Amino acid sequence: MANAIRALAMDAVEQAKCGHPGLPMGAADIATVLFSRFLKFDPADPAWPDRDRFVLSAGHGSMLLYALLYLLGYEKMTIEEIKRFRQLGSLTPGHPEYAHPPGVETTTGPLGQGLANAVGMAIAECHLAALYGSDIVDHHTYVLASDGDLMEGISQEAIALAGHLQLRKLIVLFDDNGISIDGPLALTDSVDQVKRFEAAGWAATRIDGHDPTAIAATLDVAKKSDRPSLIACRTIIGFGAPTKGGTEKSHGAALGAEEIAAARAKLGWSAPPFEIPSAIREEWRAAGMRGGPARLAWQKRLAALDPDKRSAFERRTRGELTGELAAAVRAVKDRLAQAAKDVATRAASEVALEALTVALPEMIGGSADLTGSNNTRPKGMKVLSAADYSGRFIHYGVREHGMAAAMNGMALHGGVIAYSGTFLVFSDYCRPAIRLAALMGQRVIHVMTHDSIGLGEDGPTHQPVEHLAALRAIPNLKVFRPCDAVETIECWQLALETKSGPSVLALTRQNVPRLRRGFDERNRCALGAYELIAAEDGAASVSLFATGSEVAIAVAAKKLLAERKISARVVSVPCFEIFLAAPETERAAIIGEAKVKVAVEAGIRQGWDAIVGSDGAFVGMRSFGASAPYRELYQHFGITSERVAEAALKGLRKA
Ligand SMILES: Cc1ncc(C[n+]2csc(CCOP(=O)(O)OP(=O)(O)O)c2C)c(N)n1
């Protein structure tokens, strides 16, 4: 059965003239034991909520996964798809892409991400099991990880968090082949992985990854463990390839006709390319049928569940929001619009979360050790810990990258909506995972506070300058920067309603004035940009555009211009992505026809030309920030209402 995987991997890579045969050939025995005897799944319903999850963290070994899906009888994975490995529009892309086809649990390729996704999947599993009981939620998360996965820094964050939370249903199979692209691992690494995982609170052991009996016996033990388990499986990369096996030559290139013929002979595999002898195919298909009865039994248990509980479980699994959301948003808006005090948008976000997390019990919050600064833990929200998985707030520790990747895993698992907290400047530490959330179309929400020089004295290391632009550069990511408390709840609502992609909420540390006063039922942020204050006489000669804390500066600049009898309007732009995707006529109406356009944002200009044009003016940052009280910084860097008014006047003189 394992040789069927090896043959398909060799043949598909050969046909594509590129790809990675080494891992599938080396890990074929591990995968065969796991999928034919342990993994709980049903190809007839690849999205069955209580299936075991399998994450191929070493995504370059994609042919391992494709071969398995084909052999096990996943309908969409035909032999034609295997033959079209790595071709445009095939279901067999170079690296696995989430749900492409169903059965691929996550997108992997950037090493380390899959392992960290799996930690999030295991967190979601134990949380939901605590809520719904083990009759409904009781599955394992298995990972196949390579040397590269374990060398990446993110793996340390992931394994430390998993060990701390005692995620006993997480089992990592380490393809311990001692080879990476540059050659033997001895060139680069001398970590004892078993000791490393043990130090992080895991059960860890070493076995021969080509011995099915040992693999099965160890999996049996791991399934009963009270801790997450590492099984370091000693394997030979490219197992079966007579000259290239055991070396980096089998890692990432077609083996060549001669080597493949010799490998076939060595493995005793005489079937022609892409053909699986019927006896072996039947064994695989039988393995694929194993899970059917378990799924039917599970469906019966679900049907017998208390109807309210069942419908909540099903709603959460579908990722649908509750009907209570709208009322919660309305109540918060009303309260914030009447508030007598100026607040920071991070504080407004906390007020929003107090209501949202009640309306949406699927929300699981967290922070990378900045809980008090990010305001992401509403009063009364219980901590999710090894002692109590029913909690909803995760202290991720100082592990931004691991946090963001775990959140992706939680979203992929389903049943929960994860939101996080860190400083905006550390979005750089989360970026690879945010990019994958966007690529996979997963709803995760990152609360990123301290969003500009407005954070003040912590200085340039902590002051984001290029971060808004850098995040806006990621396709399918929404970057929200609300200007006050009311916009904050509106942006929260939009982020929650964005089912098919991640969002970032960039929030201030410092207080901002209330600009949206009085209750307004509409979500004015829903267009991405809107006219906050119209010109008095209808025809503005200046349009001022701003986001977040700088909207107040634009409003003050409008007053200065009015004193000089110049009419200006102010447009708040809480979300570029939504605005730029709006129909052209709507966009044109909001951009307006004023002769002069000025944008103000305490970040770099990049991206703003799409709104103000390359001849528009920009007031913002051109350098890193500095350490000082924030009001002085705004003066020092010239992000003031006077400067904005001057820029408008200069534009008018030129026009
Ligand atoms: C973050 C990241 N860096 C680099 C790569 C490119 N890359 C792909 S596989 C690999 C290492 C291969 O070694 P290993 O993980 O042991 O896989 P094996 O050779 O056993 O297949 C590298 C550097 C990547 N995919 N992701």
Image (cartoon, helix red, strand yellow):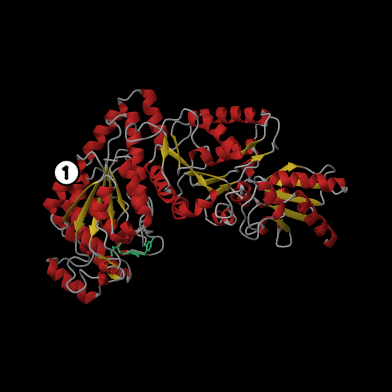
Residue 335 picture quarter: top right
State whether residue 595 appears in this view.
Answer: no
Coordinates of residue 227 in the picture (x, y in percent): 25, 41
Judge left or right: residue 611 versus residue 541: left
Judge left or right: residue 525 versus residue 616: left
Q: Give the residue pinned by disc 1.
A: 220
Coordinates of residue 291 in the picture (x, y in percent): 22, 41
Judge left or right: residue 369 versus residue 4: right
Q: Residues within 10 Å of mark 1 (few under 14, many from 20)?
A: few
State whether residue 401 appears in this view.
Answer: yes
Coordinates of residue 407 in the picture (x, y in percent): 42, 44
Residue at (23% x, 40% y) in the render: 292
> Considering the image in quadrants, where does the C terminus appear?
bottom right
Which one is nearer the viewer's eye here, 452 or 362?
452
> Considering the image in quadrants, where does the N terminus appear?
bottom left
Q: Amino acid at mark 1?
A: Asp
Which one is nearer the viewer's eye here, 465 or 547?
465
Which one is nearer the viewer's eye here, 562 or 89?
562
Q: The residue tagged with tag 1: helix, strand or loop? A: helix
Q: Is residue 282 above or below residue 148?
A: above
Judge left or right: residue 384 versus residue 257: right
Q: Which residue is farthest bottom? A: 258
